[in-house]
Image (cartoon, rainbow, N blue to C red):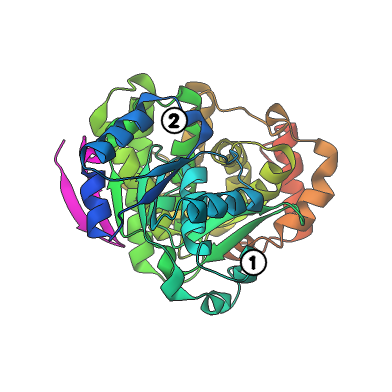
Amino acid sequence: MTAANWSFPTAIRFGAGRVAETAEACESAGMRRPLVVTDPGMADLPLLATLRDHLDAAGVSHGVFTDLRPNPLGADVAAGVIAFRAGDHDGVIAFGGGSALDVGKLVAFMAGQSRPLWYFEDVGDNWTRADADAIAPVIAVPTTAGTGSEVGRAGVVINETECRKFVAFHPGMLAKVVICDPELTIGLPPVLTVGTGIDAFSHCLEALCAPGYHPMADGIAIEGCRLVIEHLPRVVADPTDIESRGHMMSAAAMGAVAFQKGLGAIHAISHPVSVRWHTHHGMTNAVLMPYVLEANADHIADRLDRLAAYAGISGGASGLHAHVLGWRDSLAVPHTLVELGADPAAAADVAADAVKEPPAAGNPRELTEELAAAIYTAACEGALHGTR
Protein backbone atom coordinates (compact mmCIF):
# COMPACT_ATOMS: atom_id res chain seq x y z
CA MET A 1 0.00 0.00 0.00
CA THR A 2 1.24 3.47 -0.89
CA ALA A 3 1.74 5.81 2.05
CA ALA A 4 0.58 9.41 1.74
CA ASN A 5 0.41 12.67 3.65
CA TRP A 6 -2.74 14.78 3.23
CA SER A 7 -3.78 18.13 4.70
CA PHE A 8 -7.52 18.06 4.05
CA PRO A 9 -9.25 18.93 6.30
CA THR A 10 -6.24 18.51 8.61
CA ALA A 11 -2.87 16.75 8.52
CA ILE A 12 -3.50 13.06 7.79
CA ARG A 13 -0.77 10.44 7.85
CA PHE A 14 -2.19 7.56 5.87
CA GLY A 15 -0.64 4.15 5.42
CA ALA A 16 0.09 0.77 6.97
CA GLY A 17 2.31 0.87 10.04
CA ARG A 18 2.09 4.60 10.59
CA VAL A 19 0.89 4.24 14.17
CA ALA A 20 4.64 4.09 14.86
CA GLU A 21 4.70 7.85 14.15
CA THR A 22 2.37 8.73 17.02
CA ALA A 23 5.13 9.96 19.32
CA GLU A 24 6.54 12.21 16.60
CA ALA A 25 3.02 13.50 15.90
CA CYS A 26 2.68 14.38 19.58
CA GLU A 27 5.89 16.40 19.37
CA SER A 28 4.65 18.24 16.29
CA ALA A 29 1.43 19.08 18.13
CA GLY A 30 3.29 20.32 21.20
CA MET A 31 2.28 17.46 23.48
CA ARG A 32 4.66 16.21 26.16
CA ARG A 33 2.24 14.43 28.52
CA PRO A 34 -0.75 13.16 26.49
CA LEU A 35 -3.72 11.28 27.85
CA VAL A 36 -4.68 8.30 25.71
CA VAL A 37 -8.49 8.10 25.57
CA THR A 38 -9.65 4.73 24.29
CA ASP A 39 -12.43 2.16 24.43
CA PRO A 40 -12.49 -0.11 27.52
CA GLY A 41 -12.27 -3.13 25.23
CA MET A 42 -8.85 -1.91 24.13
CA ALA A 43 -7.36 -2.02 27.62
CA ASP A 44 -5.78 -5.47 27.32
CA LEU A 45 -5.42 -5.70 23.54
CA PRO A 46 -2.13 -5.69 21.61
CA LEU A 47 -3.23 -2.59 19.68
CA LEU A 48 -3.06 -0.40 22.77
CA ALA A 49 0.09 -2.11 23.98
CA THR A 50 1.76 -1.38 20.64
CA LEU A 51 0.79 2.28 20.81
CA ARG A 52 2.11 2.57 24.35
CA ASP A 53 5.35 0.83 23.40
CA HIS A 54 5.92 3.42 20.67
CA LEU A 55 5.29 6.24 23.14
CA ASP A 56 7.54 4.69 25.79
CA ALA A 57 10.34 4.12 23.29
CA ALA A 58 10.24 7.81 22.42
CA GLY A 59 10.15 8.84 26.07
CA VAL A 60 6.62 10.24 25.88
CA SER A 61 5.05 10.14 29.33
CA HIS A 62 1.34 9.37 29.08
CA GLY A 63 -1.76 8.19 30.91
CA VAL A 64 -4.66 6.05 29.75
CA PHE A 65 -8.39 6.67 30.23
CA THR A 66 -10.84 3.90 29.28
CA ASP A 67 -13.94 4.70 31.36
CA LEU A 68 -16.39 5.33 28.54
CA ARG A 69 -19.42 3.55 27.10
CA PRO A 70 -20.08 2.30 23.54
CA ASN A 71 -22.75 5.02 23.33
CA PRO A 72 -20.93 7.55 25.54
CA LEU A 73 -22.62 9.85 28.02
CA GLY A 74 -21.78 13.35 29.15
CA ALA A 75 -20.65 11.74 32.40
CA ASP A 76 -17.93 9.89 30.49
CA VAL A 77 -16.53 13.20 29.27
CA ALA A 78 -16.65 14.61 32.80
CA ALA A 79 -14.71 11.60 34.10
CA GLY A 80 -12.16 12.03 31.34
CA VAL A 81 -11.68 15.70 32.20
CA ILE A 82 -11.01 14.74 35.82
CA ALA A 83 -8.38 12.24 34.67
CA PHE A 84 -6.85 14.81 32.31
CA ARG A 85 -6.49 17.43 35.02
CA ALA A 86 -5.34 14.97 37.69
CA GLY A 87 -2.54 13.73 35.44
CA ASP A 88 -1.49 17.25 34.42
CA HIS A 89 -1.82 16.24 30.78
CA ASP A 90 -1.33 18.68 27.94
CA GLY A 91 -3.08 16.89 25.08
CA VAL A 92 -5.14 13.88 24.07
CA ILE A 93 -4.46 10.88 21.87
CA ALA A 94 -7.94 9.72 20.86
CA PHE A 95 -7.41 6.05 19.99
CA GLY A 96 -10.22 3.71 18.99
CA GLY A 97 -13.65 3.74 17.40
CA GLY A 98 -16.08 6.61 17.11
CA SER A 99 -16.92 6.64 20.82
CA ALA A 100 -13.30 7.01 21.91
CA LEU A 101 -12.64 9.63 19.25
CA ASP A 102 -15.66 11.70 20.28
CA VAL A 103 -14.94 11.45 24.00
CA GLY A 104 -11.25 12.17 23.45
CA LYS A 105 -11.98 15.33 21.48
CA LEU A 106 -14.52 16.48 24.05
CA VAL A 107 -12.12 15.86 26.94
CA ALA A 108 -9.51 17.99 25.19
CA PHE A 109 -12.14 20.65 24.52
CA MET A 110 -13.60 20.72 28.04
CA ALA A 111 -10.40 20.38 30.05
CA GLY A 112 -9.83 24.14 30.02
CA GLN A 113 -13.43 25.36 30.01
CA SER A 114 -15.28 26.77 33.03
CA ARG A 115 -18.80 26.33 31.61
CA PRO A 116 -20.70 23.01 31.38
CA LEU A 117 -20.50 20.85 28.27
CA TRP A 118 -24.17 21.45 27.45
CA TYR A 119 -23.43 25.15 27.05
CA PHE A 120 -21.61 24.43 23.77
CA GLU A 121 -24.33 22.60 21.84
CA ASP A 122 -23.94 22.90 18.07
CA VAL A 123 -26.69 25.49 17.69
CA GLY A 124 -26.15 28.91 16.19
CA ASP A 125 -22.92 30.51 17.41
CA ASN A 126 -22.76 28.69 20.75
CA TRP A 127 -19.23 27.59 19.88
CA THR A 128 -18.04 31.17 20.34
CA ARG A 129 -18.76 30.83 24.08
CA ALA A 130 -15.72 28.60 24.50
CA ASP A 131 -12.26 29.76 25.49
CA ALA A 132 -10.46 28.72 22.32
CA ASP A 133 -7.01 29.20 23.88
CA ALA A 134 -7.85 26.61 26.55
CA ILE A 135 -8.57 23.74 24.11
CA ALA A 136 -5.91 21.05 24.35
CA PRO A 137 -4.49 19.55 21.14
CA VAL A 138 -5.66 16.17 19.85
CA ILE A 139 -3.98 13.40 17.88
CA ALA A 140 -6.69 11.13 16.42
CA VAL A 141 -5.92 7.49 15.65
CA PRO A 142 -9.00 5.56 14.45
CA THR A 143 -9.13 1.79 14.81
CA THR A 144 -12.39 1.42 12.87
CA ALA A 145 -13.48 2.64 9.44
CA GLY A 146 -16.85 4.20 10.12
CA THR A 147 -17.68 7.46 11.85
CA GLY A 148 -14.90 9.60 10.39
CA SER A 149 -14.81 11.42 13.73
CA GLU A 150 -11.04 11.65 13.38
CA VAL A 151 -11.46 14.49 10.86
CA GLY A 152 -14.44 16.18 12.53
CA ARG A 153 -14.79 19.38 14.52
CA ALA A 154 -17.51 18.03 16.81
CA GLY A 155 -18.11 15.42 19.49
CA VAL A 156 -21.28 13.40 20.01
CA VAL A 157 -22.46 12.03 23.36
CA ILE A 158 -25.79 11.29 25.01
CA ASN A 159 -27.26 13.97 27.25
CA GLU A 160 -28.42 11.56 29.94
CA THR A 161 -30.72 14.11 31.58
CA GLU A 162 -32.67 14.77 28.38
CA CYS A 163 -32.16 11.26 26.87
CA ARG A 164 -31.00 12.53 23.49
CA LYS A 165 -27.90 12.68 21.32
CA PHE A 166 -25.95 15.87 21.92
CA VAL A 167 -23.41 17.49 19.60
CA ALA A 168 -20.80 20.01 20.71
CA PHE A 169 -18.90 21.86 18.00
CA HIS A 170 -15.80 24.00 17.88
CA PRO A 171 -13.17 24.46 15.14
CA GLY A 172 -10.52 23.92 17.83
CA MET A 173 -11.64 20.32 18.25
CA LEU A 174 -10.17 19.39 14.87
CA ALA A 175 -7.26 17.03 15.45
CA LYS A 176 -3.79 18.47 14.87
CA VAL A 177 -2.70 15.20 13.27
CA VAL A 178 -4.72 12.16 12.16
CA ILE A 179 -3.01 8.79 11.79
CA CYS A 180 -4.97 6.45 9.52
CA ASP A 181 -3.24 3.08 9.79
CA PRO A 182 -5.38 0.33 8.21
CA GLU A 183 -3.42 -2.34 10.08
CA LEU A 184 -5.23 -1.21 13.24
CA THR A 185 -8.58 -2.39 11.81
CA ILE A 186 -7.56 -5.94 10.85
CA GLY A 187 -8.70 -7.55 14.11
CA LEU A 188 -12.12 -5.88 14.13
CA PRO A 189 -14.93 -8.45 14.54
CA PRO A 190 -16.99 -8.95 11.34
CA VAL A 191 -20.15 -7.45 12.84
CA LEU A 192 -18.27 -4.25 13.67
CA THR A 193 -16.52 -4.19 10.31
CA VAL A 194 -19.97 -4.29 8.68
CA GLY A 195 -21.63 -1.84 11.07
CA THR A 196 -18.87 0.74 10.88
CA GLY A 197 -18.45 0.27 7.14
CA ILE A 198 -22.12 0.88 6.40
CA ASP A 199 -22.00 3.85 8.77
CA ALA A 200 -19.35 5.36 6.47
CA PHE A 201 -21.56 4.57 3.49
CA SER A 202 -24.59 6.17 5.14
CA HIS A 203 -22.63 9.39 5.73
CA CYS A 204 -21.62 9.57 2.08
CA LEU A 205 -25.05 8.54 0.79
CA GLU A 206 -27.04 10.99 2.89
CA ALA A 207 -24.63 13.81 2.09
CA LEU A 208 -25.05 13.08 -1.62
CA CYS A 209 -28.85 13.08 -1.31
CA ALA A 210 -29.11 16.15 0.92
CA PRO A 211 -30.60 19.16 -0.89
CA GLY A 212 -28.59 22.24 -1.62
CA TYR A 213 -25.63 23.17 -3.78
CA HIS A 214 -22.29 21.79 -2.60
CA PRO A 215 -20.45 20.12 -5.51
CA MET A 216 -17.30 19.58 -3.46
CA ALA A 217 -19.21 17.55 -0.86
CA ASP A 218 -21.09 15.72 -3.62
CA GLY A 219 -17.85 14.73 -5.31
CA ILE A 220 -16.33 13.43 -2.09
CA ALA A 221 -19.56 11.63 -1.18
CA ILE A 222 -19.97 9.80 -4.47
CA GLU A 223 -16.39 8.50 -4.42
CA GLY A 224 -16.77 7.50 -0.76
CA CYS A 225 -19.88 5.51 -1.65
CA ARG A 226 -18.02 3.76 -4.46
CA LEU A 227 -15.14 2.81 -2.19
CA VAL A 228 -17.49 1.18 0.33
CA ILE A 229 -19.52 -0.59 -2.36
CA GLU A 230 -16.33 -2.08 -3.78
CA HIS A 231 -14.25 -2.74 -0.67
CA LEU A 232 -16.59 -3.56 2.25
CA PRO A 233 -17.41 -7.03 0.86
CA ARG A 234 -13.68 -7.61 0.36
CA VAL A 235 -12.69 -6.85 3.94
CA VAL A 236 -15.52 -9.03 5.24
CA ALA A 237 -14.38 -11.90 3.02
CA ASP A 238 -10.70 -11.35 3.88
CA PRO A 239 -10.10 -9.30 7.04
CA THR A 240 -6.38 -9.14 6.24
CA ASP A 241 -6.89 -7.36 2.89
CA ILE A 242 -4.86 -4.29 3.81
CA GLU A 243 -5.53 -2.49 0.54
CA SER A 244 -9.29 -2.68 1.01
CA ARG A 245 -8.95 -1.85 4.71
CA GLY A 246 -7.14 1.31 3.65
CA HIS A 247 -9.84 2.26 1.16
CA MET A 248 -12.46 1.79 3.89
CA MET A 249 -10.54 4.14 6.20
CA SER A 250 -10.45 6.70 3.40
CA ALA A 251 -14.21 6.34 2.84
CA ALA A 252 -14.87 6.90 6.54
CA ALA A 253 -12.92 10.16 6.58
CA MET A 254 -14.55 11.22 3.30
CA GLY A 255 -18.01 10.67 4.73
CA ALA A 256 -17.30 12.93 7.69
CA VAL A 257 -16.07 15.66 5.35
CA ALA A 258 -19.01 15.27 2.95
CA PHE A 259 -21.75 15.38 5.57
CA GLN A 260 -20.94 18.99 6.31
CA LYS A 261 -23.50 19.39 3.51
CA GLY A 262 -26.12 17.54 5.56
CA LEU A 263 -27.44 14.14 6.59
CA GLY A 264 -31.04 12.91 6.64
CA ALA A 265 -33.68 10.57 8.01
CA ILE A 266 -31.35 7.62 8.46
CA HIS A 267 -29.42 9.48 11.13
CA ALA A 268 -32.40 11.42 12.46
CA ILE A 269 -34.22 8.18 13.30
CA SER A 270 -31.12 6.20 14.23
CA HIS A 271 -30.17 8.61 17.00
CA PRO A 272 -33.29 8.18 19.19
CA VAL A 273 -33.26 4.44 18.50
CA SER A 274 -29.68 4.07 19.74
CA VAL A 275 -30.36 6.28 22.77
CA ARG A 276 -33.36 4.17 23.82
CA TRP A 277 -32.08 0.66 23.12
CA HIS A 278 -28.30 1.17 23.09
CA THR A 279 -27.99 -0.21 19.59
CA HIS A 280 -24.80 0.10 17.55
CA HIS A 281 -25.11 3.32 15.57
CA GLY A 282 -23.69 1.98 12.32
CA MET A 283 -25.74 -1.20 12.35
CA THR A 284 -28.87 0.82 13.16
CA ASN A 285 -28.14 2.95 10.10
CA ALA A 286 -27.66 -0.23 8.05
CA VAL A 287 -31.08 -1.56 9.06
CA LEU A 288 -32.85 1.75 8.46
CA MET A 289 -31.21 2.53 5.12
CA PRO A 290 -33.52 0.76 2.64
CA TYR A 291 -36.64 1.99 4.40
CA VAL A 292 -35.42 5.59 4.20
CA LEU A 293 -34.39 5.11 0.56
CA GLU A 294 -37.90 3.89 -0.18
CA ALA A 295 -39.48 6.86 1.59
CA ASN A 296 -37.25 9.33 -0.27
CA ALA A 297 -37.24 7.50 -3.62
CA ASP A 298 -39.21 10.08 -5.59
CA HIS A 299 -36.88 12.86 -4.42
CA ILE A 300 -33.46 11.28 -4.96
CA ALA A 301 -33.77 9.17 -8.12
CA ASP A 302 -31.51 11.41 -10.20
CA ARG A 303 -28.74 11.37 -7.62
CA LEU A 304 -28.93 7.62 -7.15
CA ASP A 305 -28.94 7.11 -10.92
CA ARG A 306 -25.62 8.97 -11.07
CA LEU A 307 -24.20 7.06 -8.12
CA ALA A 308 -25.21 3.70 -9.59
CA ALA A 309 -23.62 4.56 -12.94
CA TYR A 310 -20.41 5.75 -11.27
CA ALA A 311 -20.21 2.68 -9.01
CA GLY A 312 -20.86 0.25 -11.87
CA ILE A 313 -24.27 -0.89 -10.62
CA SER A 314 -26.83 -1.54 -13.34
CA GLY A 315 -30.46 -0.47 -13.05
CA GLY A 316 -30.00 3.07 -11.80
CA ALA A 317 -31.65 4.05 -8.53
CA SER A 318 -33.64 0.80 -8.38
CA GLY A 319 -30.45 -1.19 -8.92
CA LEU A 320 -28.71 0.70 -6.12
CA HIS A 321 -31.62 0.03 -3.77
CA ALA A 322 -31.45 -3.66 -4.67
CA HIS A 323 -27.71 -3.60 -3.97
CA VAL A 324 -28.31 -2.19 -0.49
CA LEU A 325 -30.87 -4.90 0.16
CA GLY A 326 -28.37 -7.49 -1.02
CA TRP A 327 -26.09 -6.48 1.84
CA ARG A 328 -28.61 -8.05 4.22
CA ASP A 329 -27.81 -11.52 3.00
CA SER A 330 -24.13 -11.14 2.17
CA LEU A 331 -23.16 -9.08 5.24
CA ALA A 332 -25.65 -10.48 7.79
CA VAL A 333 -27.40 -7.15 8.42
CA PRO A 334 -30.68 -7.67 10.31
CA HIS A 335 -33.85 -6.97 8.34
CA THR A 336 -35.72 -5.13 11.11
CA LEU A 337 -35.10 -2.83 14.04
CA VAL A 338 -36.91 -5.33 16.25
CA GLU A 339 -33.96 -7.67 15.76
CA LEU A 340 -31.79 -4.97 17.34
CA GLY A 341 -34.15 -4.70 20.32
CA ALA A 342 -36.38 -1.79 19.28
CA ASP A 343 -40.01 -1.68 20.43
CA PRO A 344 -42.56 -1.27 17.59
CA ALA A 345 -44.95 0.45 20.00
CA ALA A 346 -42.54 3.38 20.41
CA ALA A 347 -43.09 4.79 16.91
CA ALA A 348 -44.70 8.04 18.04
CA ASP A 349 -42.02 8.76 20.64
CA VAL A 350 -39.15 7.95 18.29
CA ALA A 351 -40.70 10.09 15.56
CA ALA A 352 -41.21 13.04 17.91
CA ASP A 353 -37.51 12.95 18.79
CA ALA A 354 -36.34 12.24 15.24
CA VAL A 355 -37.79 15.42 13.74
CA LYS A 356 -35.89 17.47 16.34
CA GLU A 357 -32.55 15.91 15.39
CA PRO A 358 -30.27 18.20 13.32
CA PRO A 359 -29.96 15.59 10.50
CA ALA A 360 -33.72 15.81 9.92
CA ALA A 361 -33.26 19.17 8.22
CA GLY A 362 -31.09 17.57 5.54
CA ASN A 363 -33.58 14.96 4.42
CA PRO A 364 -34.52 15.51 0.75
CA ARG A 365 -38.20 15.17 1.71
CA GLU A 366 -39.61 17.01 4.72
CA LEU A 367 -39.31 14.67 7.68
CA THR A 368 -42.60 15.12 9.50
CA GLU A 369 -43.52 13.14 12.60
CA GLU A 370 -45.98 11.19 10.46
CA LEU A 371 -43.30 10.20 7.95
CA ALA A 372 -40.71 9.40 10.64
CA ALA A 373 -43.25 7.16 12.42
CA ALA A 374 -44.09 5.43 9.13
CA ILE A 375 -40.42 4.75 8.39
CA TYR A 376 -39.81 3.47 11.92
CA THR A 377 -42.86 1.21 11.75
CA ALA A 378 -41.84 -0.12 8.35
CA ALA A 379 -38.35 -0.85 9.69
CA CYS A 380 -39.83 -2.70 12.64
CA GLU A 381 -42.20 -4.73 10.49
CA GLY A 382 -39.83 -5.31 7.57
CA ALA A 383 -42.23 -3.65 5.12
CA LEU A 384 -40.23 -2.20 2.25
CA HIS A 385 -43.14 -0.43 0.57
CA GLY A 386 -45.78 2.05 1.60
CA THR A 387 -43.79 5.04 2.87
CA ARG A 388 -43.51 7.07 -0.36
- Find the residue positioned furthest to the top: 237
Q: Amino acid at mark 1?
A: Pro
Q: Amino acid at mark 2?
A: Thr
Question: Where is residue 374 drawn, in percent x and y?
Answer: 76, 48
* Residue 206 vs residue 159, the one in the foreground: 159
Question: How many marks overall?
Answer: 2
Residue shown at 65% from the left, 50% from the top: 75
Residue shown at 22% from the left, 58% from the top: 28
> What quarter of the picture does the N terminus occupy?
top left
Q: Is residue 174 above or below residue 54?
A: below
How far apart are the two marked residues, 2 and 1, measured between alpha carbons? 35 Å
Q: Is residue 239 above or below residue 262?
A: above
Question: Where is residue 178 drawn, in percent x and y?
Answer: 31, 51
The residue identified by callout 1 is: 116
> Start and end of the magenta stretch?
1-20
Residue 307, numbered label: none
Question: Where is residue 65 drawn, in percent x and y?
Answer: 49, 42
Where, by quadrant of the figure, is residue 299 drawn?
bottom right
Magenta stretch holds residue 80: no
The residue identified by callout 2 is: 193
Can residue 245 be seen here?
A: no
